[in-house]
Image (cartoon, rainbow, N blue to C red):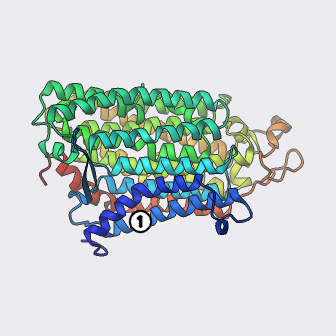
Amino acid sequence: MTVIDISPSVMQFLLAFIVVAPLLGAVAALLPAPPGLRGKNPDQAVLRHGVTVTGAVLIAAIVLAVGFDHDHPATMQATTDISWIPALGVRIHLGIDGISLPLLLLTALLTFLCALYSYFKPPAGPSPKAFIALVLVLESGTLATFAVLDLLLFFLAFEMVLIPMYFLIARWGGDQRRAAAWKFILYTLLGSVVMLLGLLLIGLKSGTFDMVALATDNGRGLTTSVQVIAVLAIGIGLAVKTPMWPLHSWLPDAHTAAPTVGSVLLAGVLLKMGTYGFVRILLPIAPDGMRTFAPYLAAFAVVGIVYGSLACLALARNGAKGDLKRLIAYSSVGHMGFVLLGIATMTPTGVNGALFANIAHGLITGLLFFLVGAIKDRYGTADLDTLAGATGAALYGRAPRLGALLAFAAVASLGLPGLAGFWGEMLTLFGAYSPAEGLSRPAFRTFMAIGAFGTLLTAAYMLIVVRRVCMGEHAPHSQLSPDDRTPQPADGPGRPTAAGSPSQLADIQTYEAAAWTPLAALTVLAGLWPAILLGLTDPAVQKLLAGGKS
């Protein structure tokens, strides 16, 4: 069933346009604007260009989704297959199925919302011209990662996002931005070098780099030892990007230093590239190798769930001087642990849960980083003790709509039933209860119990954050110092009053509502109607795990 019948050639064009248009837009952003488009403010003109390009890509992605045959989500659609480097057998092979389509839409949506937000609140730093060009290159690389069906093209797209994200952190970030950017680039590049060796091993041993042909072969052309080496090499590169404990240490620094838009894209889109690689490449192409490493992957995943939650609890406690952006970054380590646990089960239930949790994390954590960025702009800090001690009323009393939306995002993140965060975690735990044949059931049930304990820890730190930031500490009036009671906003949206009375902050602005409402609405929609996503992913996952057989 397709909502609108679109010809295959138009579908091909739309997918190619989605991948290439941001790249062309990035080049155009660096060129001098035509006389009629310069406007009075060249900076606003280039920011408007960013909104236009990302908006066009989002519209094309929506049209692609509307023309997608939802009766056959396991079939590759909108495919393009052109020989590129015949000597190496590399082809420009593009296509989407029920696994990649939701990630494509999520990337297009988040990048558009970031461009829209930046138009009204340009990032502090150098000229917006380079900023918009970097965001567009980042979008192109991410979309290409989810659309290409050739191992070497996948690697090129996977690497393409590193440079723009490095510069976004290093040039437009906050304190310690250069150190954080270096840490990000070194970790990811080292992981990628190892990953390339694994991809080349698969291509050379099987005689093809085509991901569809390799998935259909289901590892039959590769010996078990080759599969084990390939999974180890490729898995390290993917695990760094995911990030999996203990390869996660670049993430909190990168998030804390990144500008708001950088944090949203890093959490909402870039982390998904790693888990997508596990599902698209390792599960179908090297199943025996995955079966060997699945218990270890699951063990690292549940350690990450508990570790991330304990780190958040440590940051959230009174007097810890914890940074709210850093706390949300550590929460991502825990949430992505659930995704890796679902993949490690090697079952349709677990992998569907992983893919659902991927999308839910992109929506919810993207919204959280938008909100934390807005709070930091208003208060001039993201320090939890300062935010909590600002006034007895805190956000609920000073910016009630902002406080309510932060509380909504927090309860969505902790997995409240009826919101998107619930289904992914539940399905991954169900998958761990009954893992694939050949995997130790007692071990995975132990992992399931540890993961379930992690959900309680997640609820604990998120509720502490809501209580402290939204409600305040409720300390007696005399115990609050004047500095605690009246923080000075960074860029003046608040209205400081006499010490001891809650000064009002600017509540949600119109442009903020425009950027944040789609994420909140989709979080509710996915929570109440999970079939809208599972109906796409399940047939594709079943086919993938069955070795290309529907």
Q: Please provide percent x and percent y for residue 489.
A: 78, 46
State left or right for residue 343 relative to residue 268.
left
Q: Position of residue 77 (x, y in %)?
A: 25, 60
Kindly indicate the quadrant of the structure image that contains residue 296: top left
Residue 128 locus on image (x, y percent): 65, 50
What residue lies at 52% left-to-right and 40% top-to-bottom? Answer: 165
Residue 298 is situated, as x and y percent measured from the top left of the image, at: 30, 31
Seen in the picture, residue 58 relative to 132 is either above or below; the reply is below
Question: Circle 1 is placed at which residue position?
Answer: 60
Query: SS of the residue at dot 1?
Result: helix
Quadrant the C terminus occupies? bottom left
Q: Residues within 10 Å of mark 1 (few under 14, many from 20)?
A: many
Residue 417 shows up from this direction: no
Please give left or right for residue 470 compared with residue 202 in the image. Answer: right
From what the image shows, is residue 198 above or below residue 88?
above
Residue 343 makes an appearance in the image:
yes
What amino acid is labelled 1 in the image?
Ala
Horizontal side of 146 relative to 82 (left or right) equals: right
Please report the residue visible at 35 percent of the width from the left and 65 percent of the height from the top.
Answer: 64
Q: Which of 365 and 104 lies nearest the eye of the viewer?
A: 104
Pick out the residue farthest to the right.
Answer: 498
Query: 20 and 423: which one is in front?
Result: 20
- Nearest the eye: 529 or 232: 232
**Residue occupying the far bottom of the picture:** 4
Determine whether 8 is above or below 471 in the image. below
Q: Quadrant of the N terminus?
A: bottom left
